[in-house]
Image (spheres, grey):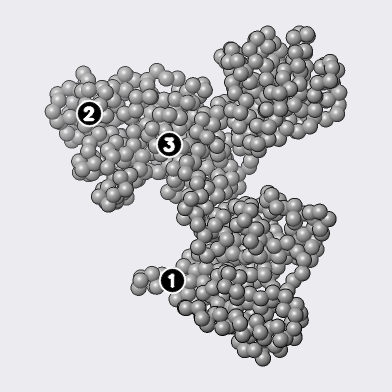
Amino acid sequence: MSLDSLLSPRSIAVVGASDNAKRIGGVPVDLLKRAGFERLYPVNPKNETVQGLTAYKDIEDVPEVVDLVVVALSAEATLPYLERCHALGIPAAIVFASGYAETGEAEGAAKQAELVAFAGRTGMKVAGPNCMGNANFSDSIFTTFGQSFQPGEPAGNTALVTQSGNMCATVFRIARRAGVTFSQVINTGNEASVELSDYLEWLADDPNTTSALCYIEELRDGPKFLAAAAKFRAAGKLLAVYKVGTSEKGAEATRSHTAALAGDSAAYDAAFSRAGVARAGKLSELADLAYLHTLGDKIAGSNCAILSISGAAGAILADALTLGGAEVPTLPADVQAALTAQIPGHSMVSNPIDMTGNMVNSNDFLSECIRLALSPDDIDVLLLYTPGAFLTGALDQVEAAAAASSKAIIVIDTFALADQTRLAEHGIGYFEDFDQAACAVAAYGKWKSATGKVTANFAPTASWPAFPAGRNALSETEGKEALAAFGVPVVHDALVQGVEEARAAADKIGYPLVAKLVSPDVAHKTEHGLIRLGLSDADAVAQAFRQMMAKAQSMSGVHIEGVTLEPMLQGGVEILAGVTRDPVFGWMLTVGLGGVWTELMQDACHSLLPVDASEAAAMLRSLKGFKLLDGYRGAPKADVAAASRAIAALGQAVLAGGERLREVEINPLLVLPQGKGAVAVDALVLLNAAAEEEELA
């Protein structure tokens, strides 16, 4: 989507222009006039001039068809005026007015629906409504009523895109204090026509923009966002996001463990990870990420060396980095030996490096310590704590070390006395707070070392049987049979409808075995006493059959297909693998410990589909409970490779399922000892209503 007319217009009309430079209709006129924008046309039927400029009574009186119209009218008056603008051929508009869907009322939603329909019918690029407009610092174009954005501010290479007007101004101020300068500042408002991902797609191609900061409340089009993020990644541009509203309050499970784990925050985490997006843990971190991006290619990852005049400060930084997901690798023995020769006494040199006060004893001491600390290949960046006079007296050494190294040096001065301008000129980073520095370096280094994953084309290896009409689920037997066609290993079982048939089948299968009721209407059989374990002979099987059938027949609305008998597998570790359909991003895979541990420990990992076996293995290894699969306390190692293949096959099955599939879960997937495979013991397949059923409803 080309947004040139919206973000970089050559001519602008302001409808509802005010002679008062403090009013909403007056601010953009004032800003544009002071910025020297020449083809500016105030429209006001009551005034002959507006702020010294010729005013026009109607948009039809403006002497040219402008690129952009800024509409500072009421919500009721806006759409009729946009129709007039479209009739003239004006391609883009910014709508300041509120009173639309953000009100939460039917009348406001109806107004926004009309605006959406207008934009769809005409093709006009309509920013907002309920937005504060934009500031293009690269071209000095200010189409906003926000007074935080003033002509004369230095232009930079960072774009800011927010879904909140107040947060737009807030993040801008925070970032400016950190020294970040901007190419574009964009407030998306209600996104009735142009949404956040459209802006990002344009910014990915903008030569004046090398990074973008986003404040997000919700994404309206997940796939479009992922595509725009991929463009940023391919261009080597930073896309940093702060996502508000990550509480799991609304994520309650109704029928599956997977749904309990796959909440809003998990979906966004999985999507950002897939796209290689840097996710800020707090609002101010957005500015820090943009600031670190100005250091260019000097930060390759988040493996940090710490050099400090204080052992306590070194420990604080090590803790903060580790908690943020960074690494503080132990330095090689030869580097430690060289550092020991530089640092007398018994100071720590393994990393963190405690220089104590010795840096004042030699003209090149600090420079040599920095060189040694950065010398290992697995060190990406150095955090240097030298506050106040210590730094001032040794700044020449820091600058010399920075000039001699291709890696980043980040100075931390808690006394806030450093010459930041001088540091910046030499490409040296600067922070005044331990935690702020550690969080920023960890987040940026993680982003820099990530690759982002482009979703591959999907080619199904099998197909599902026809989904039965009028059903919202498959039975366990149906589900396992369908998954087996895609390569998911399943427990082989026998379906029986009578006591004598159950006896005969049990003798054939062998003991001990498991009996389960088969019904598409009962998802969690354990909770209803419809699973029996460890049945050791035919009499036990017959008794379990009678009891489960009686229980199921007493339950309202339960269709009974029979009872399935299957061997009771011994040993192994139970895990869960399930897929839910996220409303924003689509299919999302969740893996975690199986059985009751899933909800009790909340130990799960999430990824958007598709996922191959190596990615599935990485998901399993990220679990805190992975030790159970890796031979915890002398237990045999589990067959992680087989489990990973089964999880990947589950993902392939779901992608081939089409719109009728709502959710698929294997719980448990029993992972047997290494070399013996993995097997799906139970399967839950939930369905959406068929299209014809929805039409009749």
User: Dot 2: few (<14), some (14–19), or many (≥20) neighbours within 10 Å?
Assistant: many
- SS label for mark 1: loop
* Residue located at (22% from left, 38% from top): 74
In the rendering, at what x and y percent does residue 555 appear?
Answer: 50, 78
The residue type indicated by label 2 comes to: Ala
Q: Is residue 196 left or right of residue 610?
A: left
Rendering quarter of residue 514 = bottom right
Q: Is residue 458 visible?
A: no
Label number found at residue 196: none
Residue of label 1: 690
Tell me which amino acid carries mark 1: Ala
Note whether residue 157 is visible.
yes
Return the disc, 3 or 2, that comes first in the chain's sequence. 2
Say which quadrant the N terminus sits in.
Answer: top left
> What residue is shown with label 2?
17
Residue type at numbered disc 3 = Thr
Q: Residue 252: x percent and y percent?
A: 50, 57
Number of numbered discs overlaid on the protein picture: 3
Disc number placed over residue 162 in the picture, else none: 3
Instruction: Work out whether mark 1 precedes mark 2 in sequence or the reverse, and give the earlier one.
Output: 2
Judge left or right: residue 422 versus residue 642. Answer: left
**Residue located 86% across and 23% down the image:** 337
Residue at (61% x, 70% y) in the render: 526
